[in-house]
Image: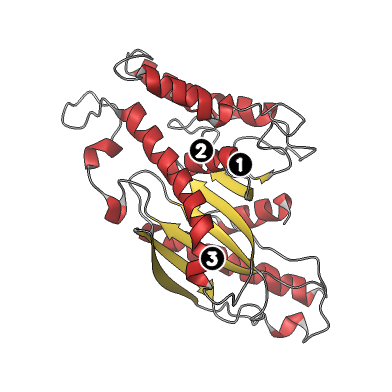
Amino acid sequence: MCADRAAAAAHASGRGATIATTSERTSARAPTTMLFSKKAPEPKRQTLVVGGITVNVYAQHKATRPDAPVAVMFLLHGRNGSALKMEEFVYGIFEEVHARRRKAAGGGAEGEARDLYIATFDQRNHGKRMVDKKANQGWFDDPEQNNDRHAIDMYAIQTGTAQDVSYLIDFLPSYLFPNGERQISQFLCVGKSLGGHATWLVLRNEPRIQVAVPIIACPDYLALMTRRAKSHKLPVGPPYFPRPLLELIQRADPAAAPYTAADASNPFLGKKILVLAGQDDKKVPWATAARPFVEGSERGGARREGGGG
């Protein structure tokens, strides 16, 4: 898996991050070109309930050989979104992956394509898991819209989502392939906005995720929320930022990790991360919420290209 391949596909789709995967092994079986027809196979959705979490898993029937290894991408929605609202992204990803596979096969590229499965689920307090709509609101002057616990609620949700990803990595293979029909060789995580914040937490805490795409997302929660609090003339302290919350952020946030270290203490070292951000984004500003972290991080020789886009 190459980060530059992910980058090119993400920009080409225009709707989300697109990742095509190939393995290093060559095959003496039927030519690759026979698999990739001009029209992309229609993605099929199966719905699984994994320990109480409803998971939608999308795959293209006969997109690759039936014994090809599988890459599972977790695609995380944004605040006030839902798993089903991500279907447009899902279809865009599959279309772009199919086009890139056809191009590679037509050029005589060797190698066996991994099968791509895309998994979506509702983040906590979203979609079918909704309990309290106000908990998804931010700080407002209007008392009817205002959520004094905005900083607490948002960190709780994205932390829970990151934990759900790890939980599903543990259990999803048994639900998908109970008889060992396929081998999952790779897990990836892609998220936008709130889902992107959760993606950074996944990268921070989950070693089984080595490739990820955080979109308009923040690896430094305190930097993001301090800016928002100041814009509303709120203190970065109780009751808006209780001491236990600040202690948790200082212990568990991506920015709290030794991300500049060139040794195993750095949880981001060696991982392939494509960061997509809006240079003029007011909600999640690239300059303050992400750029210092991204440009200061050590990822073992990974390339840094461009900036906010």
Of the two numbered discs 2 and 3 on the same chain, state the one appearing first in sequence: 3
- Residue type (three-letter) at the residue carrying disc 1: Val
SS class of the residue under badge 1?
loop
Asked which quadrant contains residue 245, the reply is top left
Q: Nearer the viewer, residue 213 or 117?
A: 117
Label 2 – label 3 distance at C-alpha: 28 Å
- Residue type (three-letter) at the residue carrying disc 3: Pro
Residue 123 placed where, x, y %? 38, 49
Label 1 – label 2 distance at C-alpha: 8 Å
* Residue beneath disc 2: 217
* Residue beneath disc 3: 173
Asked which quadrant contains residue 20, the reply is bottom right
Residue 168 placed where, x, y %? 48, 56
Identified at 48% across, 33% down, the residue is 281
- Residue type (three-letter) at the residue carrying disc 2: Ala
Name the residue at the front extreme: 179
Label 1 with label 2: CB-CB less than 8 Å: yes
Asked which quadrant contains residue 51, the reply is bottom left
Q: Is 35 positioned to the left or the right of 77 in the image? A: right
Identified at 45% across, 42% down, the residue is 193
Query: How crowded is the residue under tag 1: few (<14 C-alpha within 10 Å), some, or many (20+)?
Result: many
Q: How many numbered discs, if any?
A: 3
Q: Quadrant of the C terminus?
A: top right
* Residue beneath disc 1: 275
Query: How crowded is the residue under tag 3: few (<14 C-alpha within 10 Å), some, or many (20+)?
Result: some
Of the two numbered discs 1 and 2 on the same chain, state the one appearing first in sequence: 2
